Image (tube, rainbow, N blue to C red):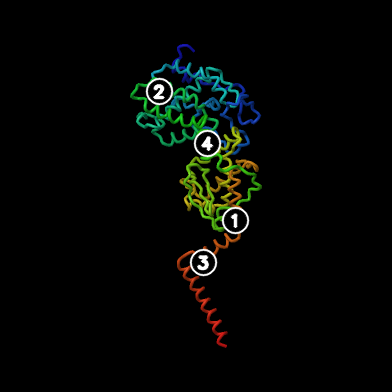
Amino acid sequence: MEGLRKEDLFDFKKPLVPPENPIGDGDESVYFHPVSDCSIYRVPKSIREGYDKAFSPRLVSLGPFHHHIKDLQALGHKESYFDDFMRESKLSTQHLFEFVKGREEAVRKCYAETIELKSNDLVRCILVDAVFIIEILLKNRDRRLVGENDRIFKKPWLIHDIKFDMLKMENQIPFTILEDLLALHQSTRESGDERLSLEIADDFAKVSFMKSRHFVDALRNHNLPSMMQSRPKKKFKSLATPSVTELSQAGVKFHVGSGKSLFDIRFSNGTLEIPKLIIYFGADVLFRNLIGFEKCNFYENYINDYIIFIGLLVHSQEDVEMLVEEGIIRISTWDSKEVFGLIKSLVKGARFVQDDFYFSGLCAELNEYYRIPWHRWKAMLKRDYFNSPWSVISVIAAVVLLLLTLVQTVFSVISK
């Protein structure tokens, strides 16, 4: 590969050809990489079935799994951004190629399958896609870097779809490669241009501190419980938990929680605090990929358990509407019926593990509160007889009248 030119990376006459027997077209019998370093997986058929669009890249392939699909190569966009990267870093194509090639073995270990692309083809794929991602991050951070003829950021819908493609579990590139290329990019820029790349490098340092290995992993880590041991898991006998409506009828109040994590859910003195859940376009894609990633890679299924818990609370469209009214669920392009359908659909793809459910203790508390009759009676009295100042006055007047009648009766008996 001596004297490699940029044109060699983007030679349309010699596109990367898929292997004769590509691995992992949804078959769960594929051979996974034997090492424990892998973190990038094919979506198992049992998870993908019926929801292929949620897992397959829509506009651009990143990494080796979908690189053979010509419609997803986006070579025009990638070549343009590669030019920007080269112009800023003043590095040769040969230098960058050898830089990535020296990390090829580590890259292969990140994928949970044997990547059948030849060495130079894989290096070319990783280099081009990693540079594309870095330029997306740089331009997204500082829009002054977006050129007049930029064909991505000038079309809001396009960058929106590309960002979602970057969050699909089969469309990942190891963070280590992005970090190393960004550091190389930073070291060759002129001193006046270092600030932005340093900011992006700092972002990667933060997610690396959380031991994130790619974007889906980083998204999951960002949403994990703020105190991992604050609620020890207990064996949960059944999934029978009162709905939002039923809990409300038992006097439970719902408030928006102030916690930064989705898991900062608290129940105390009859008040259930739940952090705000924003349901926007594409939320189903994010949750499905997070759940799929957990099933492939983790024993701790936190996102999976969160979805199950929300599903336990939401039994109907009315439950969704109540949570929306309380500000706990915020919807933009969805309506309450669609959100209810989404939650039920996500729950079907989740997996309930009886003796390892994160919210088992909380569900037990809710069940215990709901089973005490006094809570329902008190809520009924408040709802039916004390729901307004006039109702309170009427009840007081009735009680006073009853007492006066009783006193009058007593005096009548005595006088006789």
Sequence-first disc among 4 and 2: 2
* Residue at 36% from the left image edge and 28% from the top image edge: 147
Disc 1 vs disc 4: which is toward the camera? 1
Judge whether residue 136 can be spotted in this image.
no
Q: Amino acid at mark 1?
A: Tyr
Residue to which mark 3 is pinned = 385
Which one is nearer the viewer's eye here, 24 or 388?
388
Residue, far bottom: 416
In which quarter of the view is residue 414 placed? bottom right
Q: Amino acid at mark 4?
A: Arg
Residue to which mark 4 is pinned = 220
Badges 2 and 1: C-beta atoms under 8 Å apart?
no
Q: Which mark is residue 370?
A: 1
Q: Which mark is residue 186?
A: 2
* Residue at 56% from the left image edge and 81% from the top image edge: 410
Judge whether residue 233 can be spotted in this image.
yes
Sequence-first disc among 3 and 1: 1
Q: How far from the left and from the top, in percent, is residue 365? A: 59, 51
Which one is nearer the viewer's eye here, 128 or 229?
229
Badges 4 and 2: C-beta atoms under 8 Å apart?
no
Report the number of discs: 4
Disc 2 vs disc 1: which is toward the camera? 1
Q: CA distance from mark 2 to mark 1?
A: 59 Å
Q: Dot 3: what SS?
A: helix
Q: Dot 1: what SS?
A: helix
Residue, far top: 2
Q: How far from the left and from the top, in percent, is residue 161? A: 47, 35
Q: CA distance from mark 3 to mark 2?
A: 69 Å
